[in-house]
Image (cartoon, grey):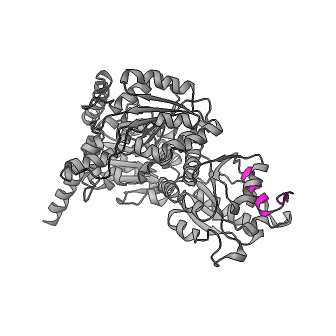
């Protein structure tokens, strides 16, 4: 018996639309409420990566979108299937990543009657999506799906996740091709907002007046890879990427000042943000972090333009087109720069990088276990230049930002969402089977999605998952030790044998307790991927984030130094 052979059912039309939009892979976990769609997706030849938890499916769709620039698609069944995705959807929301989640729900005949797995998904999803709706009318379902995809891609403003659910009875209904408009099925080219010429002229006046310009790029600048280098040279500015747009500018570019980020921020008199929110990672744009700066803000959506600190001017337009327009009109007259300051910051940046390269980080912590930085030193020795690096963790992320020097780099972003490392790694390895994929995870964060190692095995995702196994939620443990009288409560784990777990799931697993064995272990992991390299690391290795008080969560700012500056600023303003 084949109850799902109708090629004009709503489920079939949805699968056809996905194919028309060049979706060749989706991520999900099966369930009866989405079975008609699941089957038709497979019939269309779209690969389904079936996962062990729906949260991981959305993380994989997130990584798919981030790495390809295309829509990531996830499927989840009703009730707990959909609610399991909430954290991952929220992470994509704050990261502004186009993800489409198609969920299941009860039939229209059972709606609001207490049906199996019935809960108001759309109300749950509404605050963390660009679109959240139920498609109840069969001949309008494709129109609504097209709308959801448009919202996810940012056609109505900011990009981000969209949620749509279709009841099973609607999925099974037949819809005549005469009722499906061609423009619902076909992809549309991305919109590119042209900059207002008057605002461009205003921006040039501000740039020419600046002595110490600093450019900070974010996710919204990722499509400006050709325009941004020209702009930096034309303007003669310093540059920070704050991880959101790593790889846009080579690390050895003369403008890069990441090693002396604090000084550049504190001393700049003009800060140019490109598709970058002024969130906690940038001190909310406060004068406490930027005491001397005015702001010029450029973004193609308002949320990256007006948050926390207004620009003068602000340009709502495509970042690349705006940078090109500024460079063309600026010509050779960029204004007068404080060359002594530029040289000083650049020299300090280079000196700090050189010192770091000359002086190897400690191999061991004070307790004799492996220092986390030794992992990254070993990675440098075995990776190809085009490897994909992924970081996942709390304390571990602080080490990874310095040590994981991949041009293609991903982490959880502003949401600080633990558990992305394994799903991101699976998606990356499937997308780029000829590139090395290395995901470095804290042991706490690894545990959240560790079963996706099984997904990697089943689907041949040849990623290497390195676990920094310090048996603790360490940034919180250190905070307890320093600020809570040394009362260590609920922050200790065990040095679990994650390598043995990996072998039990069919992956390669190796445990490392000697730093001299790291290079060999990672090499063997790459040769036998998917692999888990379980590295027993030191709790006594204190990260820069721990030193700066991130775990303490100060009142006004994320870091203690900024918090003290903010307190002083507020006190002075009040008196």
Q: Which of 302 and 404 is in front in this view?
A: 404
Location of residue 395 in the rendering, given as x and y in whole percent from the top left corner:
34, 43
The quarter of the rendered structure image containing the C terminus is: bottom left
**Where 140 falls versus 239 (above or below)?**
below
Location of residue 432 in the rendering, given as x and y in whole percent from the top left corner:
61, 34
Does residue 146 show up magenta in the picture? no
Residue 465 showing in the rendered view: no
The quarter of the rendered structure image containing the N terminus is: bottom right
**Where 303 falls versus 255 (above or below)?**
below
Q: Residue furthest bottom?
A: 113
Task: Indicate left or right for 143 with 308 as reference.
Answer: right
Q: Which of 132 and 82 is in front in this view?
A: 82
| Residue occupying image coordinates x 33% and y 24% | 357
Q: Which of 379 and 516 is in front in this view?
A: 516
Location of residue 530 in the rendering, given as x and y in whole percent from the top left corner:
57, 33
The stretch in magenta equals: 1-19
Query: Where on the picture, by quarter, is residue 535?
Result: top left
Location of residue 507 in the rendering, given as x and y in whole percent from the top left corner:
57, 33
Q: Nearer the viewer, residue 343 or 426?
A: 426
- Marker count (numbered): 0
Residue 12 showing in the rendered view: yes
Q: Which residue lies furthest to the left in this view?
A: 575
């Amino acid at each position: 018996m084949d109850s799902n052979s109708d090629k004009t059912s709503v489920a079939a039309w949805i699968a056809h639309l996905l194919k028309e939009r060049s979706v060749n892979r989706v991520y999900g976990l099966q369930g009866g409420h989405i079975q008609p769609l699941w089957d038709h997706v497979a019939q269309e030849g779209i690969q389904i990566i079936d996962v062990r938890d729906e949260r991981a499916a959305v993380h994989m769709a997130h990584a798919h979108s981030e790495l390809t620039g295309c829509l990531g698609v996830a499927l989840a069944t009703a009730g707990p299937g959909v609610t399991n995705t909430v954290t991952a959807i929220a992470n994509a929301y704050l990261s502004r990543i186009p993800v489409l989640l198609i969920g299941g729900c009860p039939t229209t005949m059972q709606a609001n009657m207490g049906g199996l797995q019935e809960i108001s998904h759309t109300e749950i999803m509404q605050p963390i999506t660009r679109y959240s709706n139920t498609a109840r009318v069969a001949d309008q379902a494709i129109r609504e799906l097209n709308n959801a995809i448009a919202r996810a891609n940012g056609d109505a403003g900011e990009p981000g996740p969209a949620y749509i659910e279709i009841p099973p009875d609607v999925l099974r209904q037949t819809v005549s091709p005469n009722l499906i408009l061609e423009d619902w099925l076909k992809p549309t080219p991305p919109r590119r907002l042209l900059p207002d010429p008057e605002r461009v002229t205003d921006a040039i006046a501000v740039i020419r007046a600046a002595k110490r310009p600093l450019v900070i790029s974010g996710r919204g600048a990722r499509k400006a890879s050709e325009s941004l280098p020209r702009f930096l040279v034309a303007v003669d500015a310093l540059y920070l990427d704050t991880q959101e747009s790593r790889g846009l500018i080579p690390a050895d570019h003369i403008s890069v000042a990441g090693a002396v980020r604090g000084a550049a921020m504190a001393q700049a008199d003009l800060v140019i943000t490109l598709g970058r929110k002024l969130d906690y990672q940038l001190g909310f744009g406060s004068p406490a972090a930027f005491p001397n700066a005015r702001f010029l803000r450029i973004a193609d959506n308002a949320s990256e333009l007006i948050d926390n600190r207004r620009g003068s001017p602000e340009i709502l337009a495509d970042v690349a087109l705006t940078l090109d327009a500024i460079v063309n009109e600026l010509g050779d007259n960029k204004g007068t720069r404080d060359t002594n300051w530029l040289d000083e910051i650049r020299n300090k940046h280079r000196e700090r990088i050189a010192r770091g390269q000359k002086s190897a980080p400690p191999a061991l912590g004070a307790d004799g276990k492996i220092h986390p930085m030794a992992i990254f030193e070993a990675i440098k020795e075995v990776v190809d230049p085009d490897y994909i690096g992924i970081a996942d963790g709390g304390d571990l992320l602080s080490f990874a930002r310095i040590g994981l020097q991949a041009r293609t780099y991903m982490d959880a972003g502003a949401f600080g969402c633990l558990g992305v490392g394994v799903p991101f790694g699976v998606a990356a390895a499937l997308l780029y089977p000829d590139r090395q994929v290395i995901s470095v995870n804290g042991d706490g964060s690894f545990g959240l999605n560790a079963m996706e190692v099984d997904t990697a095995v089943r689907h041949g995702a040849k990623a290497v998952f390195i676990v920094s196994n310090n048996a603790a939620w360490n940034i919180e443990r250190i905070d307890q030790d320093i600020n809570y009288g040394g009362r260590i409560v609920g922050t200790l784990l065990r040095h679990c044998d994650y390598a043995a777990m990996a072998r039990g799931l069919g992956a390669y697993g190796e445990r490392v307790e000697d730093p001299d064995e790291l290079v060999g272990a990672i090499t063997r992991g790459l040769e036998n991927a998917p692999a888990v390299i379980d590295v027993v690391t030191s709790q006594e290795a204190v990260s820069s984030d721990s030193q700066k008080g991130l775990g303490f969560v100060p009142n006004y700012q994320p870091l203690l130094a900024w918090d003290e500056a903010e307190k002083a600023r507020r006190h002075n303003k009040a008196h």
